[in-house]
Amino acid sequence: MIKIQMPMSKEYSHQQTARPAARLRFWPFALVALGAVALCGCGSNPAWKSQSFAFALLDYSPPAVSKTNVVALRRVTISPLFQSHSFIYRTGENSYEQDPYSGFFTPPERAIEQPIRAWLRDGGALGYIVDPGSGLSPSLMTDISVNELYGDFRKKGHPAGVLQIHFILYETSKGGPGRVLLDKVCTRQTAMTKATPAALMVAWDADLREIMTEINSELKQLPLN
């Protein structure tokens, strides 16, 4: 992981000489703080700074729409374990750490909703994918649950970005939800090139790309109008 070195001011250096007892009290807390930051991999230089990230936006040209369905993303939810703005790192079978310096620029459910909508449009399998607040009445709806969203640091030297999405597509009518057309859970784990927040974001982008490619492929097999 990344090693952090705190710069020492002249004033503090003088205090070290003048007050050895204070020095002994200070270092245990400093070592704990440095250890936590090193574990999170959130520091790239001695000056600690906050970093904000977002999923990559898909660069695409909307395909010609051959379907007549109007599709809405009813909701995108994140498991309570991973709802935080801060990046989450899995360090053991049942242990996790939050990165106090690196996280999503927006709430994670909003961060992932926009690229999912773009991937569905790019796939062209469903019809018209409407934005929130649209006045069009949808004939199909999707519920998307993100069950896993973390950096996996359980294997030393082999960090990975993990993403699991539960995708449900169903018909709608005036009476409420109708027939379920697709119910699929997709999980991806992409190796990180470095133990850094930026590398984790790149891995999550790769996870999402593979998951949405698989979902679009499944959607194209459905007998939709």
Image (cartoon, rainbow, N blue to C red):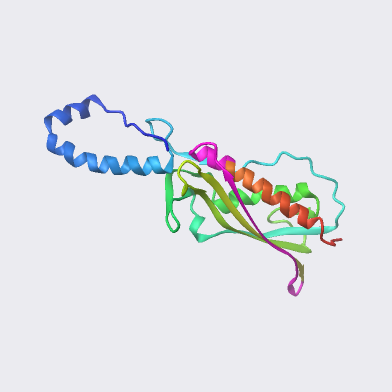
Magenta residue check for 191: yes
Position of the C terminus, as image quadrant, is bottom right
Direction from residue 115 to residue 178 in the image, left or right: right
Residue 202 point in image, percent of width and height = 58, 40
Residue range corresponding to the magenta coloring:
174-202
Q: Residue at x 49, y 58 (%)?
A: 81
Q: Tell which of 147 and 86 is nearer to you.
A: 147
Q: Residue at x 41, y 35 (%)?
A: 2
Residue 148 point in image, percent of width and height = 55, 56
Direction from residue 83 to residue 69 in the image, left or right: right
Residue 146 point in image, percent of width and height = 59, 57
Up/down of 132 relative to 194, above or below = below
Q: Residue at x 72, y 52 (%)?
A: 214
Direction from residue 132 to residue 1 in the image, left or right: left
Q: Tell which of 103 and 28 is nearer to you.
A: 28
Q: Residue at x 43, y 51 (%)?
A: 91
Q: Tell which of 53 and 148 is nearer to you.
A: 148
Position of the N terminus, as image quadrant, is top left
Magenta residue check for 80: no
Quarter of the figure with residue 173: bottom right
